[in-house]
């Protein structure tokens, strides 16, 4: 398995600029979204779905991890 590429500050800046204005305007939402993006980069989308994002039925415990 190949290792994911390293994330530079320029990569993070570009990623933040790609978020919708309503995400960039809300500091808490921006920090959460960027954190999920970084974790997803290294662990993959399925890991995020299984461990961070609440499912539609809200069957997972509150919070995340």
Image: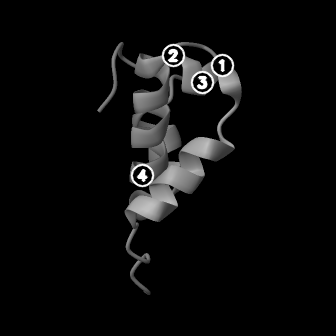
- The residue under label 2 is 26
- The residue under label 1 is 22
- The residue under label 4 is 38
Mark 3 burial class by Cα count in 10 Å: few <14, some 14-19, many 20+: some
Q: Mark 2 or mark 4: which is in front?
A: 2
Residue 41 visible to the viewer: no
> Disc 3 and disc 2: Cα gap in Å?
6 Å
Residue drawn at x 55%, y 43% as measured from the top left: 16
Mark 4 element type: helix
Mark 1 element type: helix
Q: CB atoms at circles 3 and 2 under 8 Å apart?
A: yes
Depth order, front residue of 42/22: 22
Mark 2 burial class by Cα count in 10 Å: few <14, some 14-19, many 20+: few
Measuring from the top left, give residue 62's x and y in whole percent. 36, 13
> Disc 1 and disc 3: Cα gap in Å?
4 Å
Direction from residue 14 to residue 8 in the image, left or right: left
Q: Mark 1 or mark 4: which is in front?
A: 1
Residue drawn at x 46%, y 54% as measured from the top left: 12
Q: CB atoms at circles 4 and 3 under 8 Å apart?
A: no
Q: Quadrant of the N terminus?
A: bottom left
Q: Mark 4 or mark 3: which is in front?
A: 3
Q: CB atoms at circles 1 and 2 under 8 Å apart?
A: yes
Direction from residue 10 to residue 62 in the image, left or right: left
- Tell me the quarter of the picture where residue 14 sits: bottom right
> Disc 1 and disc 4: Cα gap in Å?
19 Å
Measuring from the top left, give residue 7's x and y in whole percent. 40, 67
Mark 3 element type: helix
User: Which numbered marker is on residue 23?
Assistant: 3
Mark 2 element type: loop
Task: Of the two numbered discs 4 and 3 on the same chain, state the one appearing first in sequence.
Answer: 3
Note whether 19 is above or below 43 in the view shown.
above
């Amino acid at each position: 398995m190949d290792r994911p590429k390293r994330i530079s500050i320029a990569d993070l800046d570009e990623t933040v600029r790609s978020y919708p204005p309503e995400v960039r305007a809300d500091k808490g939402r921006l920090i959460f979204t960027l954190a999920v993006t970084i974790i997803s980069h290294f662990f993959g989308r399925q890991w995020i779905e299984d461990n961070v994002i609440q499912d539609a039925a809200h069957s997972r415990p509150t919070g995340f991890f």
